[in-house]
Amino acid sequence: MTKPVGVRIIAIGFFLEAAVIAIMGIRPMLPLIYQLIKTSNDASTGLAEIAAMVVLDSFVFTVLHVLAGWGLWKLKNWARVLAIILSTLAAVFELLRWLFAHHLGVSYILSIGISAVIVFYLTKPNVAAAFSHGSVGVRRLDQLA
């Protein structure tokens, strides 16, 4: 089975999202961590630790998005599941951000909409079938009879 165009677009989107996460999450925090460690005589503030956790979180999500993009490009079923999980997490975090911000912006709607479209598309039977090509154990029950 050929690779659906939508899967290619989503894979490229995951690669781009990984780049944005890396640039926006990791790079700006490193000088902050260095400055906090260098100037902090009192370690009780915990700001350096929080900044380090943000960097670690950004690094982990960058790696997960790269893996999802690569796996989608190679039509790996685990990557389809990972992409669904990451898109669902993105939508949940946007909903939480909206609840705490108490105003509805275009970015919230756009992010939740894109995540919903990705989840909907990757769960369509014909798209899921493209990922099950050649893999053992991912067969529909009616095919077993």
Image (cartoon, grey):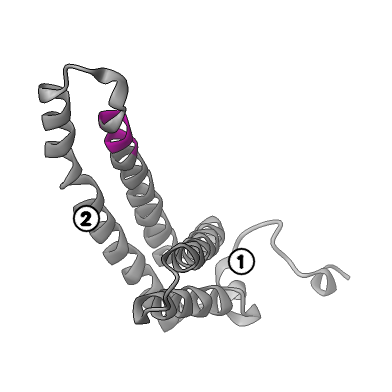
The tally of labels here is 2
Q: Is residue 130 magenta?
A: no
Per the rendered image, the range of residues in magenta is 48-53
| 69 up-or-down from 31: above or below | below
| 120 up-or-down from 33: above or below | below
Give the image quarter of residue 17: bottom left
- Residue 57 horizontal/vertical position (percent): 37, 43
Q: Which residue is mark 2?
A: 24
- Residue 31 horizontal/vertical position (percent): 11, 38
Q: Which residue is mark 1?
A: 132
| 128 up-or-down from 93: above or below | below
In the displayed structure, does residue 128 sit left or right of residue 96?
A: right
**Residue found at the very far right of the displayed protein:** 145
Amino acid type, residue under disc 2 in the picture: Met
- Residue 11 horizontal/vertical position (percent): 37, 68
Q: Nearer the viewer, residue 39 or 126?
A: 39
